[in-house]
Image (cartoon, rainbow, N blue to C red):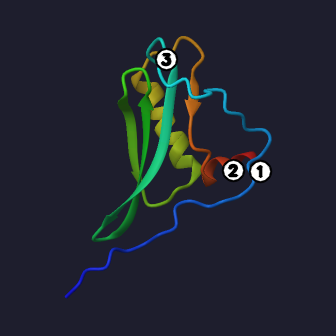
Amino acid sequence: MQWIKPWIATTRTCNFSSALHNILAQRFNPDRPDDVWCTDITYIWTQEGFVYLISVMDLFARKIIAWTLSKTMKVSCVVKTIEKAKSHRTVTKPLIIHSDRGCQVRQEVA
């Protein structure tokens, strides 16, 4: 018997809104904590189906500072994870939140 890995489309191509700009500009070594956070969503196959892992990483320390599991990839789940990260940190200066501009971001800008 051969096990076949389930497949799900996680990347959708589209034209990004001109309202989104890459202000990080590949400066991946910030000078201080809470200067740049990166977010991402990945999926994990479980016996009950797919779940989505949403994470926020502080780019200074390369440390995950917040994460959530969700059955959907709704933008509210991303916002919830960012709020969770904010509750664990003392953010006193403006920070950059960088993402790959996935479908959740496009939905909010559109």
Q: Quickly name the residue at label 3.
A: 30
User: Are the residues flagged by discs 2 and 1 in contact, CB closer than 8 Å?
Assistant: yes
**Residue 9 in picture, x, y percent from top left:** 52, 67
Kind of residue at badge 2:
Arg
Question: Is residue 100 placed above or below 94 in the rendered structure?
Answer: below
Q: Residues within 10 Å of mark 3 (few under 14, many from 20)?
A: some
| Residue in the image at 42% along x and 41% along y | 55
Q: Position of residue 97 (x, y in %)?
A: 56, 30
Q: Residue at x 31, y 71 (%)?
A: 48
Instruction: Answer left or right for 51 relative to 28.
Output: left
Mark 1 is surrounded, within 10 Å at the Cα level, by few (under 14), some (14 to 19) or many (20 or more) other residues, namely few
Q: CA distance from mark 1 to mark 3?
A: 30 Å
Furthest residue to the bottom? Answer: 1
Q: Which mark is residue 110?
A: 1
Say what amino acid the circle numbered 3 marks.
Pro
- Callout 1 secondary element: loop
Q: Which amino acid lies under the numbered mark 1 shown in the image of this protein?
A: Ala
